[in-house]
Structure formats: C-alpha cells, structure tokens
Image: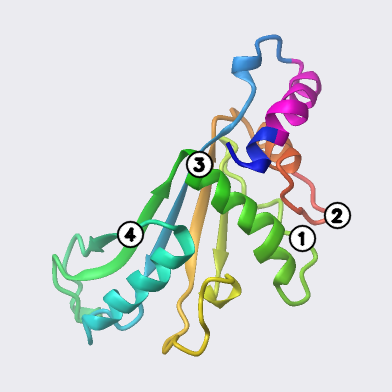
Amino acid sequence: MNNLQVQFMKTGLKELQKELGIKNPMAVPALAKIAINVGVKDAILDKKNVEKASSIFAQITGQKPKVTKAKKAISGFKLREGVEIGLMTTLRGKKMYDFFEKLVFIVLPRLRDFHGVSTKSFDNRGNYSLGFEESSVFPEVDTGKVEKVQGFEMTIVTTAKSKKEGFLLLQKLGMPFQKDGKI
C-alpha cells in the first residue's frame, strides 16, 4: 500500500465513518477506480498522432492505454466507422492510489492560479469528473518533445451513494476543493 492509502485506512476511514454515521466499516465509501479518456486531435489525418498520444498517456498513467475506435461514421467530420480516434485506461488498486496521490499533491498545486477544484462536477452517485486542457501539467511529460497539446478527462469512481458521501471521501483523501463550493 502507498502512503495515501495507509494514511486513509488509519485515520480518514474512522473519521468518515463517524461523520456519515455508518456502523459497518465495510460500508464506508472508498475509491473504486479512475477512468481516464483522451480524444486524440487530428487522429483521422495522421495515425501517428494516436501513437504519440499513447506514449504520453502511458507515461502519465503508468500503464498502456487501450485504443478506442469510432462506433459510427459521421460524414461531417470525415469520420468512418472503426477508425482509431481515442485512448482510454482504467486504473485500479495500487496504480489508482499512486495516480490519485500524484494528482492531488503534485499536479493540482502546480496549476497556475489554482484555487481548488469545483464541487459541481459530482454526479448523483458520488463520482467526480475532472478535465485537463493539456497534459504538460504532469511532471513525467517532457514539454520539449510534445508536438501537439492534448487534453484529457478523468472520472474518479467511488462506492459512495450520494454527492455528499463522494465529496467527504475525496476531501478526506486530500482533494483540494474550492472554499466557497457547495454540494
């Protein structure tokens, strides 16, 4: 187990259990997985863009991403069915906690004019979605080798049953939310 997971198991789990009034410690919300998704720019024009984005994405997440293909043809975008247009990966277990720790304690504080993440990005099941306009905010990415700026989205999936439970879980794990944000 990594530092964040151990720290949460020792202190955060019991505090969260008391705050939510849950008797069974196994019913306390926890992180389930982190799903990360990239739509590759200009993937239709040059197939090498998918390979380049894949290598950057693998550096960020620590595992090789799955290439996603178009489900149907859209003539307005010159897109054909089955063309490779994106990347996705799902992190679980140790890699998930390592990525979350890096996100919360290294990447988010490095953002310019950062005042916390929005509390409005929760769905009704307590999952949190977050997007980045560029991948160069991660320390693994060498900005000199990046030809095209690529953004991506991630969803932090929890076992929470409501927005409040998801918010409290991520807050205990160290996610820096905006001060005035209400759920």
Q: Name which of mark 2 and mark 3 comes first in the sequence.
A: 3
Residue at image position (33%, 78%) is: 52
**What residue does disc 2 label?**
179
Please state which amino acid type lies under the numbered disc 4: Pro
**What residue does disc 3 label?**
94
Q: Name which of mark 4 and mark 1 comes first in the sequence.
A: 4
Q: Name which of mark 2 and mark 4 comes first in the sequence.
A: 4
Q: Is residue 128 visible?
A: no
Determine which of the numbered discs, if any, sits on residue 65 in the image. 4
Please state which amino acid type lies under the numbered disc 3: Lys
Give the magenta part as a residue range: 7-21
Are the two marked residues, 2 and 1, in contact with CB atoms closer than 8 angstroms? yes
Q: Name which of mark 3 and mark 1 comes first in the sequence.
A: 3
Instruction: Quote the CA–CA distance across marks 3 and 1.
Output: 25 Å
The question of residue 23 being in magenta is answered with no
Residue at image position (70%, 72%) is: 111
The question of residue 11 being in magenta is answered with yes
Number of residues whose C-alpha sits closer than 10 Å to that of mark 3, classed few (under 14), some (14–19) or many (20 or more): few
Element marked by disc 1: loop
Q: Can you tell which of label 3 and label 1 is closer to the viewer?
A: 3
Instruction: Quote the CA–CA distance across marks 3 and 4.
Output: 17 Å
- Tell me residue 27's x, y (percent): 60, 17
Determine which of the numbered discs, if any, sits on residue 116 in the image. 1
- Tell me residue 18's x, y (percent): 80, 19
